[in-house]
Image: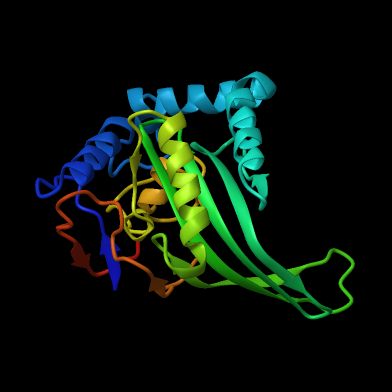
Amino acid sequence: MIRYFPLNNRHNKLYEEIGETIKQYYPIGVRPDSPEYKEHPGIKKIMAIIEENATQNKKFTKPWVDFLKKLRSGSKRKIHNNSLPHDLSFSGELILESYQDESLQRTKKLIFSISLIAPFFSIYGVDETAIKEQDDEFGRAYRAINVITESPYKEFEIDFNYLQYEIEAQFNGYKFVPVRVSMFHVENLHTPYSNLDECKLHNALFNGYFDFTPSTPFRGEMYYGSGPSNNITVELLPPPPMA
């Protein structure tokens, strides 16, 4: 069953602000290949951000690169830049563990993203495995996310708290979006560079990291960081009819 994020949620201030952001930037129900989509004021703002990132990448990303250097100076972990020019966020990853042999790769990491269209950020832990294609000249592997950690939990606690503290200090006023929420679909939402029939909240605010992620187990505090009221009204609807 698909989980949908309602855009008119009055039960939680954070979710209400997220819904208003989506309605501001995206023409809900309009396909990206239509003239109406391209002329939407929010889409024009998004495309301007992407164009600036692509044409002036070094200047555009300098504040983020400087922030990653600051993070590295305060941590013994490896921290990498994961940002892509067409993403709607700056993103990075902090590696807790990494292992590989001839047939398997295994990684435990924290992924963090800062939205470029609204004052939101995300942090979540990922345990990922990849089965290597034997004797493949391109080094292909078949990846799967085994579990997502949605809060400062067990082995993720220290580094999760470190990232959250530094992000909130650097990006004043930015609000944490629970990863479980960002994986909800938004009914009839289409983002500029996604081929999905219907996009997730994560596509709209951050990037397409979860585009091909099936139902994944979570661990940690449910809806961590959602504010004083953890109530969220979720619509469970059947998939839209096929055209």
Residue 77 picture location, percent across and down: 66, 53
The reply to whether residue 170 is visible in this rendering is yes
Residue 81 picture location, percent across and down: 65, 42
> In the displayed structure, does residue 164 sit left or right of residue 99?
left
> In the displayed structure, does residue 180 sit left or right of residue 230?
right
The C terminus: image quadrant:
bottom left
Q: Residue 56 is drawn in which quadrant?
A: top right
Total labels: the figure holds 0
Residue nearest the viewer, comparing 40 with 220: 220
- Point 56% across, 70% down: residue: 127
- Point 47% across, 54% down: residue: 160
- Point 44% across, 66% down: residue: 149
Instruction: State the colouring used for the structure image.
Output: rainbow
The N terminus: image quadrant:
bottom left
> In the displayed structure, does residue 105 sit left or right of residue 101?
left
Residue nearest the viewer, comparing 189 with 137: 137
Query: Looking at the picture, does residue 166 appear above or below residue 11?
Result: above
The reply to whether residue 33 is visible in this rendering is no
Q: Residue furthest left?
A: 10
Residue 46 picture location, percent across and down: 44, 28
- Point 46% across, 67% down: residue: 148
Residue 86 picture location, percent across and down: 57, 36
Q: Residue 115 is drawn in which quadrant?
A: top left
